Amino acid sequence: MATLKDVAREAGLTVTTVSRVLNNRGYISEDARKKVADAMKKLNYRPNEVARSLHSKKSNTIGVIVPHIRHPYFAEMISNLENAAYKKGYKILLCNSQSTKERAEEYIDICNSNRVAGLIICSTDVPVDIFSGMDIPVITIERALDNATASVVCDNKSGGQLAAERLIKADCKKLLYLGSSSSVEMPAHQRGTGFKEICENEGVPCIEVDPEEASYNNMTYNEWLETVMKEHMDADGIFASSDIIAAQAIQVCRKLSIHVPEDMKIVGFDDVVLASLTTPQLTTIHQPIKEMAEIAINLLDDAAKEKLVAKQTILPVFMVERETV
Amino acid sequence: MATLKDVAREAGLTVTTVSRVLNNRGYISEDARKKVADAMKKLNYRPNEVARSLHSKKSNTIGVIVPHIRHPYFAEMISNLENAAYKKGYKILLCNSQSTKERAEEYIDICNSNRVAGLIICSTDVPVDIFSGMDIPVITIERALDNATASVVCDNKSGGQLAAERLIKADCKKLLYLGSSSSVEMPAHQRGTGFKEICENEGVPCIEVDPEEASYNNMTYNEWLETVMKEHMDADGIFASSDIIAAQAIQVCRKLSIHVPEDMKIVGFDDVVLASLTTPQLTTIHQPIKEMAEIAINLLDDAAKEKLVAKQTILPVFMVERETV
């Protein structure tokens, strides 16, 4: 592989000049720039980012820790994070905790060893105390971590309220809230809080049922949903805390010959790709995943440059009307 | 941040001994190992992988290039690649070409600058000539690239044959094949070849229709599908070249009051999470994504160690019966 020296020789310039061109430092003539570019092209030279990282003590890599990659919400989040990072000149080191504390810890060690510029945490598996002594920005998305640099969440409570209002307006008389499997404190729990608050105010009965942790990990809620719905055959409206639960609620309704939306109205949460791929298509609360990802990357970038950043950013949600209400 | 020197001082050993422990080189007593481990823990010391990469000329990072992250197939593939890489001690640098040649090229440059151990290409946007002069293994998955080190595909043709046999056995009299939008030569094109071959042999009429490139990029096939199905109201069986197309075929059937599976039988391809989230659930051809990811990582690892590797690996597919046939 060609070295900086080879480029200098080919361009007929000193190593110092070539280095100045590469790092865009000091005055460089257009002529010198062109010579270096031509020589680099001819020799197929690529600057060594590894050496650069060693010099600057930090790489331009961001560690992203998610509990699952194939879960539609995280796939969508990773996609948007990658896009936002790319625009700012960062790369993504993808870390999948697979909902285990050990793997999350191990990945944080790997990120540290690779001198990442910062961490974005979308997983609840990361132990809080692990960040003490780390001098890089840590941004959480939809996660509560006391000692993070900044957190980005959507307005979960208002999402729950919107769902309740919509179902009650559609004349539902008994509602089910399909909650979260997580025992850890999470911003998403506010979805239920907002939902139940409106139900109570409006005097509409509402029952909360929470799935097992295992359902979250393997994304399979059908059996649990069938039991729940058979127990509450008089329910006529469902608010699911994620689109993936809502999609399976549609399936169970079909199995039990309950027509959606005629006999059962369903509202999901997230508005991921899946929401428009179900039959019928899901009415759901739109979480601004794209904007949340962009803000997370911007916060990380600002914090890395030692700018003051907002401790918490809450983005608005809205309802997307499709076919299940 | 603590340095190697600090660890040596804390452990009461020389820097050379600590370095030998860290790199597992030469004879080291159990006592020395324990002292180093204790000192590292106490000082929160993490070895600098960046420096290590510079020394070894290669990092333990694998560049993974996909056209889309949020597409269910690629989300599933990335998830399995990450898992397989983790087990072998590799990290994933995630590159999203977003179906553009420019971005694919730019990402390959970034991978080069970061001295990746190898590349895994799941995208057709990568120009073939870019690999000339690169001395790292390049593994393709479901992509045709002449100068790649090794390619991993599933048995696409046999998948198409299985789909045709199943639909004909279910008494379908006129079949539609919903093909690929890609004009580039791809292994997936064999799905149609196998399907049409069986139809011809059995004397069952089969019409191939291919979506626009735009549909692939935004994952939206509904409008196109509605036109196609209205043109062929006498069709009673569909083979879709991906589950995401099949999911939308179910939606369009509902819109046109065509009952699935009574009046229209549908077979998908991929068997991603989506296939079990549609209503009714999709009957589909299972692509062994997990095994393909594992083999790709193993091939890359072997090739990086200069072992001889198989030029092409073809994995078997099978049919998963659910509710659409």
Image (cartoon, coloured by chain):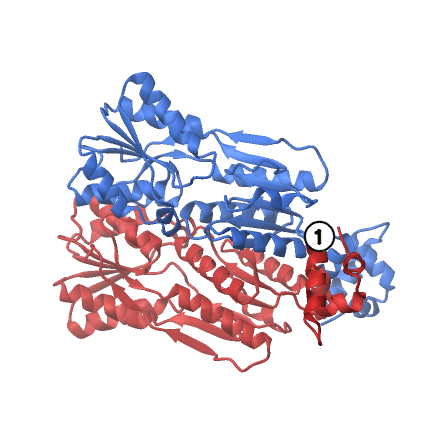
Chain colours: A red, B blue
Which residue lies at the image location 24% right of the left edge and 66% below the top edge?
A: A163
In the picture, the quarter occupied by the C terminus of chain B is: top left
Place residue B262 in its image quadrant.
top left
Tell me residue B225's x, y (percent). Answer: 26, 42
Task: Say whether residue B45 is visible.
Answer: no
Which residue lies at the image location 69% right of the left edge and 32% below the top edge?
A: B308
In the picture, the quarter occupied by the N terminus of chain B is: bottom right
Comparing B47 with A185, the one in front is B47
- Chain letter belonging to callout 1: A
Q: Tell me if residue B235 comes above or below residue A172 in the rendering.
A: above
Q: Residues within 10 Å of mark 1 (few under 14, many from 20)?
A: few
Comparing B215 with A155, the one in front is B215
Tell me residue A178's x, y (percent). Answer: 29, 58
Q: Tell me if residue B289 comes above or below residue A32 in the rendering.
A: above
Q: Tell me if residue B195 comes above or below residue B183 in the rendering.
A: above
Helix, strand or loop under label 1: helix
Left or right: residue B317 versus residue B34 is: left
Task: Say whether residue A151 is visible.
Answer: yes
Comparing B323 with A147, the one in front is B323
Place residue A198 in its image quadrant.
bottom left
Which residue lies at the image location 36% right of the left edge and 66% below the top edge?
A: A288
Place residue B110 in its image quadrant.
bottom right
Q: Which residue is mark 1?
A: A42
Left or right: residue B116 versus residue B247 is: right
Question: Residue flagged by tag 1: what amino acid is it?
Answer: Lys
Tell me residue A120's x, y (percent). Answer: 52, 66
Tell me residue A206's x, y (percent). Answer: 21, 64
